[in-house]
Amino acid sequence: MENKSITAMMCLFARANHQQYDKRVLDDNISPVLISDEEYQGILKSLEESIDFFETDDVSKAINKHIAPAVIGRDAYALSCIKTEARLGTKRLIILGAGYGTIAYSPACRGMEIWEADRSFNDKIGRLNEADISIDDISFSESVLPEIRIPKSSKKTVITALGLVYYLSKKEFEETVKALSELTAEGSSLIFDYPAEEYCHKLQSPQGEIMKAKYGYREIEALLDRQGFKIYELLTPKEIESRFFSEFNREYGDRPLIAEAGVNYCLAVKK
């Protein structure tokens, strides 16, 4: 994460914006205090000024259709998997591409050895300190994928790699999975989202990041298998919407959360 990465800031905005709803897919009381009022209102104003691009006259509809689903959905999925893994005895959590993410500060992760990995943490740590949020239980690793500067451990580990696969070549992604396999114990799990072959994103990355690869199911299965991981669960957009967004959408049918077409969630386990 570069200081004030625009992509990371948009994700932070999406999580903070979601907290306005009484019924939420993702409860997150930290994101709203990590983003300043000036930053929040600046992003909101920019979206309002670009409203024609989203083919709606309602900024809330635009956010919930085009921006929030990817961020809210994948974090909700990751947290549901982490809770299950914790019950099964997982003791370590690695968050790749942590950005301004708040998963590590969730009650679901208490008692775990936690590592956040990204390019830089100066700005994030400053925000956490300013908000008086304890980072005593978090270790920060300045890592650029596929290199991961985190010690090997015999502890069963859960790893999240959210919003990353889009910007890695197939070679870089496999090298990342290989590195994770080498530093984690049997039974460890990897949670990630990835673009399927039918993926066609309407919005461009604010920083001009280029999507480098798409995957069919057999291809992602083979890649994981070569590095010792087996797919345990894979969710399609229809399944994501049904599992995570259906209750919200019943309550807020005028501005529903729409799962992004061609984006799948995957949980893989090291055998």
Image: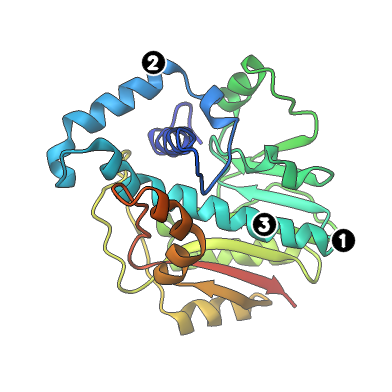
* Badge 1 or badge 2: first in the primary sequence: 2
Q: Is residue 174 left or right of residue 135?
A: left
Q: Secondary structure at mark 2?
A: helix
Q: Position of residue 209 (x, y in %)?
A: 34, 47
For marks 1 and 3 on the same chain, the one whose residue lies earlier in the sequence: 1
Q: Which residue is mark 3?
A: 159
Identified at 26% across, 63% down, the residue is: 200
Residue nearest the viewer, comparing 85 with 181: 85
Where residue 8 appears, x then y in whole percent? 45, 37
Marks 2/3 in contact by CB < 8 Å: the verdict is no
Q: Nearer the viewer, mark 1 or mark 3?
A: 3
Among the 4 quarters of the image, the one containing residue 99: top right
- Cα–Cα span, label 1 and label 2: 45 Å
Q: As displayed, is residue 257 above or below residue 262?
A: above
In what element is the residue under mark 3? strand
Mark 1 vs mark 2, foreground winner is 2
Q: Amino acid at mark 3?
A: Ile
Quadrant containing the C terminus is bottom right
**Nearer-the-camera pick, 154 or 14:** 14
The residue under the point 49% across, 35% down is 19
Taking the spot 52% from the left edge, 27% from the top edge, the residue there is 32
Taking the view exactly as shown, the residue that stands out farthest to the front is 251
Residue 209 in view, yes or no: no
Q: From the image, tell me which residue sits under label 1.
A: 154
Mark 2 or 3, nearer chain start: 2
Residue type, label 1: Ser
Which residue in the structure is indicated by mark 2? Answer: 38
Decide: few, some or many residues near mark 3? Use Cα within 10 Å; few <14, some 14-19, many ≥20. many
Instruction: Judge whether residue 231 can be spotted in this image.
Output: yes
Of the residues shown, which amino acid type is indicated by label 2? Glu
Q: CA distance from mark 1 to mark 3?
A: 14 Å
Q: Are marks 1 and 3 in contact (CB under 8 Å)?
A: no
